[in-house]
Image (cartoon, rainbow, N blue to C red):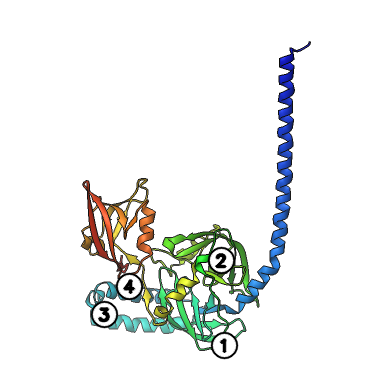
Amino acid sequence: MKLPLEQYLRRRSDAGAICAALALAGLAVLAASASARADDSDLAGLQPVIDRAVQLVSPAVVRVIGTEQTAEEVAAAARAERARRLRETYSDEAASSASPAEEAAEEEQGSTKKEESEAKAKTHVRTGLVISSDGYVLTTLTNIGGQERGLKVELADGRVLAAKRLGDDRRRDVVLLKIEAVGLKPATAAPKAGLRVGQWVLALGRTLPVAKATVGKGILSGVGRQAGLAVQTDADISPVNYGGPLVDLRGRVVGLIGAADVAGGGGRTGAADQFSSSGIGFAVPLEDILAELPELAAGKHIEAPFLGIRFNMTRLEKGATITEVLAGTAAKASGLRTGDIINEFEHHEIESPFQLLYEIGSRRVGDRVEFKVQRDGQTLVLHATLQARGAW
């Protein structure tokens, strides 16, 4: 059967289009294959660069050795930490919940239990990072918790030295140690301003009983995370390697790997496990840690700033709606009320509740802040001085 001329031409045109599409698809597959081969080749070409970067930073990667605490010691450390926070938040009188006789009995009982536990003490090994030639070493609160005594540092050359605990930053999950040593090779910080999402990074740790540091490879997958405290990476990171460096391909330290937490949860075991094996890891920029080094070296405990509110994190509109104002906090003193909507904080418009979390968390305890709220159709300007999170 013969087809009309127009129908015949239309079918020829359709067949041509199909052939052209198949040809383009084939070319795309070939291009993708070639691209994949090029990527593999690029990765192979990176190996000498990676080896060089690891070689540069490895002398600064150390083992931090601590004594595992018994349940009694953990409880005693928790009581001491709570008392310290209460003293900072309220007063010495508010922190003393027991009578002098009760405290003396508890201290005597604790001493007996401590003597019993020391005979059963075990050690654990975590990672640390040398940041000065004269013996300043960083590790994380997650690694050593409240432990004050019995800490040691094993250097890359095998020397084991006693370590003194100095200050810490609970937001950044950072603690500073000091060993008596000179002539060490400290880590060099990568400029924070030059960090770019997508750049290659290496995660180093030194906990295994082998001569070389372990290395995980990945990219920098985010910056300005955790209220601006941390960068994010997809490099493989084991929680036992917290305290180790995240390194760029020039051998400079991007940041200290840890469990940075805007709420100041440093030292919690759960924080270490939260993102393990999930393809997400955090590191605090080394530049930021070095900026607060004088405070840490002086033994200061840097707390997370706290306004004293809870707010709706699912709100889709601009602003953050207050769902609770906690008694005795800066928020309560400022005049904030449940139902208020914070639209501006320190002259920054609040686009979402997460931005308010960022604005509060990126400041320091003692900072006086200004914010605008919407209440009953009116705009109010309020002020508050941020407190330490303390007992809340």
Q: Where the C terminus falls, by quadrant?
A: bottom left
* Location of mark 3 (residue): 102
Q: Which sits in the foreground, 377 or 148?
A: 377
Q: Secondary structure at mark 2?
A: loop
From the image, tell me which residue sits under label 2.
Answer: 238
Give SS at disc 1. Answer: loop
Nearer to us in this view, 262 or 105 = 262
Question: Label 1: few (<14), some or many (≥20) within 10 Å?
Answer: few
Tell me residue 372's x, y (percent).
27, 55
Task: Name the kind of residue labelled 4 in the image.
Answer: Arg
**Could you tell whether 127 is left or right of 318 in the image?**
right
Pointer 3 and pointer 2: residues touching (CB < 8 Å)? Answer: no
User: Distance between the Cα atoms at labels 1 and 3?
Assistant: 49 Å
Image quarter of residue 190:
bottom right
* Residue type, mark 1 in image: Gly
What amino acid is found at the position of numbered circle 2 in the picture?
Answer: Ser
The Cα–Cα distance between marks 1 and 4, rounded to whole angstroms, is 39 Å
Q: Alpha carbon of mark 4 to alpha carbon of mark 2: how far?
A: 29 Å
Q: Is residue 167 left or right of residue 203?
A: left
- Disc 4 marks which residue? 82
* Residue 369 point in image, percent of width and height: 29, 64
- Of labels 4 and 2, earlier in sequence is 4
